Image: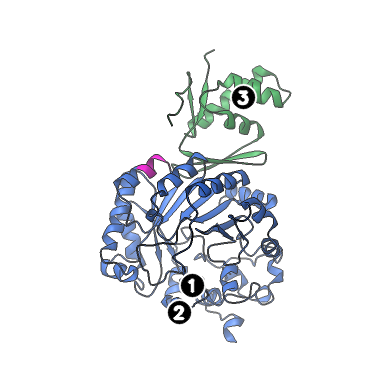
Chain colours: A blue, B green
């Protein structure tokens, strides 16, 4: 993190500002990915007007960084209008999409709106592997064409790959494809449980040896996504009075139905914007207050773990595993892969 | 002295965080922080309002400063921000955006 970003984040933390918000505008999707963490596809999506009102409220609360995601965002016919409204309100807008519906018109419009970037999911450099993951024949071609269109219009495109068994260790080839297309690249090393807690999909995670290879790959460090980063082991352990994560402190997630959570991977409900203004939920939700009181020293297992400095403990994953203050087994496994040392929770 | 009309670049994202304004350039995601006085000028930089008016109505109204000195500082600021590509400066007002 740059010194300036660190300054902004500290200021947001001290003032209780939701600096970054992830808004899913739909859960509908035209693909059927093996690893998808979503368990609901239906529900009364916020329509254009409530979304516009929510964006105004977020702006007044101080939110600068806005991620628009789904589901597949371009399944909403009004998606570009949502982006336009967000840019009128001066948000830094990043979009997550599978790219299959990004046509020339959309690419041109996004360029004109000066979005900060578009993240496009790609799971392999081999069409047959990508299409097997998405369950949609021809999706690889449509996704790659979308990246080409975005880049041609000057939009900053980033290929995001989730590391999983179907593509195995072929992430370097995907990175090379991204470079060839003129796109940035980042690798998310973790397949997380579904939001209803179902853990079957985590079987798609790669073997420890490959995790270790990824964690030690110098070309990946610094380009890691926000969740479960492939960070090297820190030289010093985090302070025990430090915050375990920014979720609920300076960032949060809003679902297509208006539910507010600390993070997209953290199903601790704080409230719903159809029932209460966002600002009230953010400031006064008892769940948010409880979450904000937690410090590393309050984590009974993790605080004394010798691998604390090598761990990217995700409180959302811990919560989904049943204990807000407990360790996340997935993160323990990654710390094990990173160091070769087995953390206590894995020995039980 | 010709009038100057500063306008925030549409290729920026920005937000006021208490006494500062944070600006991000879309081109390369570079971040800038503007202090209290610069923040006042940034917020008023709509392309329609002359810099002299901004300095008089926003800066001098808020702080006990000499107009001439404040104007020179403001001009230096807007030229510096223009150099970073996050502000546009022209000698005539921008046409109002068509809705």
Determine crowd level at label 1: few under 14, some 14-19, many 20+ residues with C-alpha closer than 10 A: some
Which numbered disc, 1 or 2, marks the residue that appears first in the sequence?
1
Instruction: Please tell me how many numbered marks the rendered image carries.
Output: 3
Determine crowd level at label 2: few under 14, some 14-19, many 20+ residues with C-alpha closer than 10 A: few
Mark toward the viewer: 1 or 3? 1
- Please, which chain is the residue tagged with disc 3 on? B
Residue B23 appears in view: no
Residue nearest the observer in this picture, A89 or A64: A89
Say yes or no: labels 1 and 2 on the same chain: yes
Mark toward the viewer: 2 or 3? 2
Query: In screen coordinates, is B93 left or right of A240?
Result: left
Determine crowd level at label 3: few under 14, some 14-19, many 20+ residues with C-alpha closer than 10 A: few
List the residue tagged with mark 2.
A200
Position in image of residue A259 (x %, y %): 56, 60
CA gap between label 1 and label 3 equals: 55 Å
Position in image of residue A253 (x %, y %): 55, 58
CA gap between label 1 and label 2 equals: 8 Å
Tag of residue A194: 1
List the residue tagged with mark 3.
B73
Which residue is painted at 52% across and 14% down in the image?
Answer: B2
Q: What stretch is highlighted in magenta?
A: A109-114
Q: Which residue lies furthest to the right in this view?
A: B64
């Amino acid at each position: 993190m740059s010194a300036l970003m660190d300054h902004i984040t500290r200021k947001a933390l001290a003032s209780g500002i939701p600096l970054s918000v992830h808004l899913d505008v739909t859960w509908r999707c035209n693909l059927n990915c093996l690893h998808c963490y979503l368990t609901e596809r239906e529900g009364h999506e916020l329509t254009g007007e409530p979304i516009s009102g929510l964006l105004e409220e977020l702006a007044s609360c101080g939110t600068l960084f806005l991620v628009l995601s789904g589901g597949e965002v371009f399944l909403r016919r009004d998606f570009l209008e949502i982006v336009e409204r967000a840019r009128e309100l001066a948000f830094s807008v990043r979009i997550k999409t599978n790219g299959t519906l990004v046509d020339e018109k959309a690419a041109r419009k996004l360029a004109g709106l000066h979005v900060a970037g578009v993240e496009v999911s790609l799971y392999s450099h081999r069409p047959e592997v990508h299409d097997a993951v998405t369950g949609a024949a021809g999706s690889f071609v449509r996704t790659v064409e979308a990246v080409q269109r975005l880049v041609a219009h000057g939009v900053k495109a980033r290929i995001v790959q989730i590391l999983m068994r179907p593509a195995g260790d072929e992430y370097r080839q995907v990175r090379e494809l991204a470079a060839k297309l003129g796109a940035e690249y980042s690798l998310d090393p973790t397949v997380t449980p579904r939001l209803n807690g179902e853990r079957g999909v985590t079987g798609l995670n790669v073997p420890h040896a490959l995790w270790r290879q990824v964690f030690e790959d110098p070309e990946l460090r610094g380009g890691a996504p926000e969740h479960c980063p492939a960070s090297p082991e820190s030289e010093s352990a985090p302070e025990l009075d430090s915050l375990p994560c920014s979720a609920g402190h300076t960032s949060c997630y809003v679902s297509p139905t208006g539910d507010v959570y600390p993070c997209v991977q953290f199903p601790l409900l704080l409230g719903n914007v159809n029932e209460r203004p966002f600002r009230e939920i953010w400031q006064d939700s008892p769940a948010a207050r409880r979450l904000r009181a937690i410090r590393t020293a309050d984590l009974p297992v993790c605080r004394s773990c010798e691998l604390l400095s090598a761990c990217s403990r995700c409180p959302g994953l811990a919560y989904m595993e049943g204990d807000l203050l407990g360790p996340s087994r997935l993160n323990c496994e990654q710390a094990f892969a990173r160091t070769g040392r087995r953390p206590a929770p894995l020995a039980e | 002295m010709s009038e100057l009309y500063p306008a925030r670049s549409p290729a920026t994202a920005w937000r006021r965080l208490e006494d500062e304004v944070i600006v991000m350039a879309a081109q390369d995601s570079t971040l800038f922080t503007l202090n209290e006085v610069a923040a006042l000028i940034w917020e008023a930089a709509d392309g329609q309002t002359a810099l002299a008016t901004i300095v008089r109505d926003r800066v001098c109204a808020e702080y006990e400063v000499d107009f001439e000195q404040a104007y020179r500082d403001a001009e230096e600021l807007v030229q510096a921000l223009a150099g970073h590509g996050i502000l546009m400066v022209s000698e005539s007002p921008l046409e109002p955006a068509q809705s």
